[in-house]
Image (tube, helix red, strand yellow):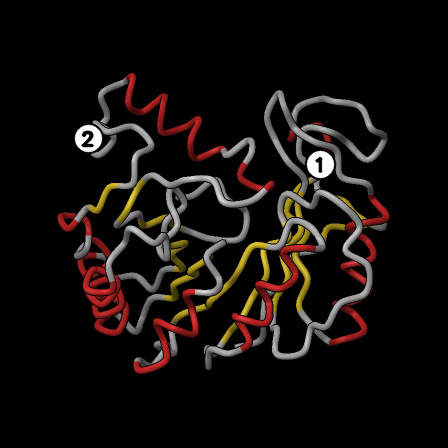
Amino acid sequence: MSRIEWTEQTWNPTTGCTKVSPGCLNCYAEVMARRLHAMRTPGYRRGFALTLHPSRLNDPIHRRPPTTYFVNSMSDLFHRDVPDSFLDRVFDVIQRTPHHTYQVLTKRAARLPKYFANRPCPDNVWLGVSVEDKRRLSRIDFLRQVSARVRFLSVEPLLEDLGEFDLSGIHWVIVGGESGHRARPMLGEWADRVRRLCEAADVAFFFKQWGTIGPDGIARSKAANGRELAGRIWDQYPAP
C-alpha cells in the first residue's frame, strides 16, 4: 500500500530526477532515494540519478485485483532523459492492464502534447501536471491539449496564492502543503481559494495535507496538523 493519500500503490519503472522549478526544492523523492541508496536497496545503486528499470515494467501485469497506481512517485515519467521508446513500453503495459487505473503526474508538461500527438492516451490513465505557483499555471494549457479521460492538477506544494485561473477541461485538483524540516508555509486562504474555484467549476477537490507548517503557522508533525480545510476533510475523486 502507498502512504500517498490519493492512491493505492506506486509503480516506478524509472527512478531519479532533476530539478526544474521551485516545487522541486525540497523533493521528498530525492531524500528517500538517498536513504535507499545508503541502505543498498535494489534499484537505488545510482541514488537519485535518472535510471530506467525495464525489470519493473511487468509488475502491474502480475497483480490481479483492480488497483490504482501512481506512476513514478520516485521520478518523472516524462523527464527528457526517458526516451519515447521506453515510454511506449510503459504505456503498452498500461493498455494491457485495463483493470488497473494509472495516475501519471509530471512537471514536464510541454512534452505531453508532443508525445501523445500520434498516440492515444489509454482510457485507464489519469494524466496530471504539478502546479506550485502562478508561473507554473502555464502547464495546464499543455495538459488540456491531450485527450485524457481524466486530467488532474497536483497543486503541491502550494507556494503562493494562484489567484483566479481557468479549470476548463480539468476533472480533479489535489492541494497540499510541503513536508519536511525545510518546509515552506502554505496559507489557508491560498488553499481555500483553489477549493472554491473547483466548487464553482464542478471539479473534484482533494485536500491532501497541511504538511509540516499548520494552518496557524506553527511547525509540527504532518499527522498533528491534520487534513481539514474549511471545517472538513475533502476527499473528492473524479466521477467514473
The residue type indicated by label 2 comes to Pro
Given the current orientation, which residue lies at the most extreme left position?
55
Quadrant where the image shows the N terminus: top left
The residue drawn where x is 71% and y is 55% is: 134
Q: Which residue is mark 1?
A: 226
Residue 35 position within the rendered picture, expressed as x and y whole percent measured from the top left: 36, 21
User: Which label number is shown at residue 50?
Assistant: none
Residue 102 position within the rendered picture, expressed as x and y whole percent measured from the top left: 38, 63
User: Which label number is shown at residue 42?
Assistant: 2
Dot placed on the residue nearer the N-terminal end, 2 or 1: 2
Q: Is residue 141 above or below residue 80?
A: below
Residue nearest the observer in this picture, 98 or 193:
193
**Kind of element beneath mark 1:** loop
Q: Is residue 55 left or right of residue 106?
A: left
Q: CA distance from mark 2 to mark 1?
A: 33 Å
Image-quadrant location for residue 216 = top right
Residue nearest the observer in this picture, 27 or 113:
113
The residue drawn where x is 33% and y is 39% is: 16
Q: Is residue 124 above or below residue 49?
A: below
Image-quadrant location for residue 32 = top left
The residue type indicated by label 1 comes to Gly
Disc 1 crowd rating (10 Å Cα; few below 14, some 14-19, many 20+) is some
